[in-house]
Image (cartoon, grey):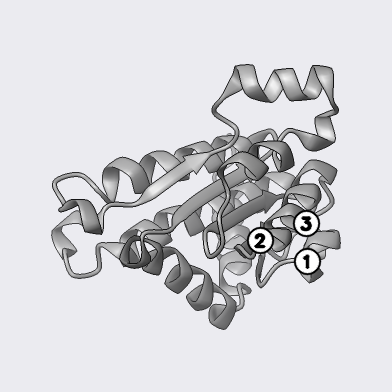
C-alpha cells in the first residue's frame, strides 16, 4: 500500500473537519448537553452507516456519559434504529418512509432533541421524522454531507460535512459523535485520552 494514500486520506479528512461551521456545532453540542439538565430525551436516527452512528451515539451517551452519575445527570437517549421488530413492522405494513416518524409519534415530546443523521440529507424517512418532530415541538439537529440536501433547511441546527464522498461524510459524523462526548466530559480530562 503506498504511504501517500494514508497521508492523503488523513489530509482530506482534516480538511473536511476544518470546514465544519463551529457556531452550528457549538449550538448542537449545547443542545445535547442540556438535555440531561432538563430531563428531556435525545432521539437519534439514520440509515445504513448513519444508523450505526445513531446507535453508537445512543450507546456512548447512555453508558459513557452517564455511568456512575446521579440520575439527574444521566442522558435519556434512544436510537430509533435499534428496535428492529418495530422498524421492520412499519417498513412492511406501512412504508419504509415511516419507520422513524411513526416511532417518534409514540416516543417524542416537546423539547426532546432529535438528531437526524443523513449523509445525503435527502433520506425521506429522516425528513418525515423531522416533520413529526416539528409537530411535537421538538428541537432538531441535522448531521449531513453533500451540501446538506433537503434536510439542511428543515432542522434548527445543521452541521454539514463538506464532502460528496459518503465515506468522508461518515468519518466526519463519527468524529462529531466522539467530539460531543468529549465535550460532555470536558471537566474530566483523564477520560479524553
Q: CA distance from mark 3 to mark 2?
A: 13 Å
Residue 158, above or below 40: below
Q: CA distance from mark 1 to mark 3?
A: 8 Å
Q: Position of residue 52 (x, y in %)?
A: 56, 35
Q: Is residue 49 left or right of residue 191?
A: right
Front disc: 1 or 3: 3
Image coords of residue 123 (percent x, y)? 81, 45
Residue drawn at point x = 50 percent, y = 37 percent: 55
Q: Is residue 89 left or right of residue 97?
A: left
Mark nearer the N terminus (2 vs 1): 2
Q: Which residue is mark 3?
A: 131
* Residue bearing mark 1: 154
Quick one: 42 or 117, which is closer to the camera? Answer: 42
Circle 2 residue: 142
Q: Secondary structure at mark 2?
A: strand
Identify the residue shown where x is 47% and y is 70%: 31
> Which residue: 80% across, 65% down?
147
Residue 147 visible in the displayed image: yes
Image vertical order of residue 58 relative to residue 131, above or below = above
Using the image, determine if residue 115 lies above or below residue 156: above
Instruction: Judge by depth and name the residue closer to the eye, 157 or 149.
Output: 157
Q: Secondary structure at mark 3?
A: helix
- Distance between the Cα atoms at labels 2 and 1? 8 Å
Amino acid at each position: 500500500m503506498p504511504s501517500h494514500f494514508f497521508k492523503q486520506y488523513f489530509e482530506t479528512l482534516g480538511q473536511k473537519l476544518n470546514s465544519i461551521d463551529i457556531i452550528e456545532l457549538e449550538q448542537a453540542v449545547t443542545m445535547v448537553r442540556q438535555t440531561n439538565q432538563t430531563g428531556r430525551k435525545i432521539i437519534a436516527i439514520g440509515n445504513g452507516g448513519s444508523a450505526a452512528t445513531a446507535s453508537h451515539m445512543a450507546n456512548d451517551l447512555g453508558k459513557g456519559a452517564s455511568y456512575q452519575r446521579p440520575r439527574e445527570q444521566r442522558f435519556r437517549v434512544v436510537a430509533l434504529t435499534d428496535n428492529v421488530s418495530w422498524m421492520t413492522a412499519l417498513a412492511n405494513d406501512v412504508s419504509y418512509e415511516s419507520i422513524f416518524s411513526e416511532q417518534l409519534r409514540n416516543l417524542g415530546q416537546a423539547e426532546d432533541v432529535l438528531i437526524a443523521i443523513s449523509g445525503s440529507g435527502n433520506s425521506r424517512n429522516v425528513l418525515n421524522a423531522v416533520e413529526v418532530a416539528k409537530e411535537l415541538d421538538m428541537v432538531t439537529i441535522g448531521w449531513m454531507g453533500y451540501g446538506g440536501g433537503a434536510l439542511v433547511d428543515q432542522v434548527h441546527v445543521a452541521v454539514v460535512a463538506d464532502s460528496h464522498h459518503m465515506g468522508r461524510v461518515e468519518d466526519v459524523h463519527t468524529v462529531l459523535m466522539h467530539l460531543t462526548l468529549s465535550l460532555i466530559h470536558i471537566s474530566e480530562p483523564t477520560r479524553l485520552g
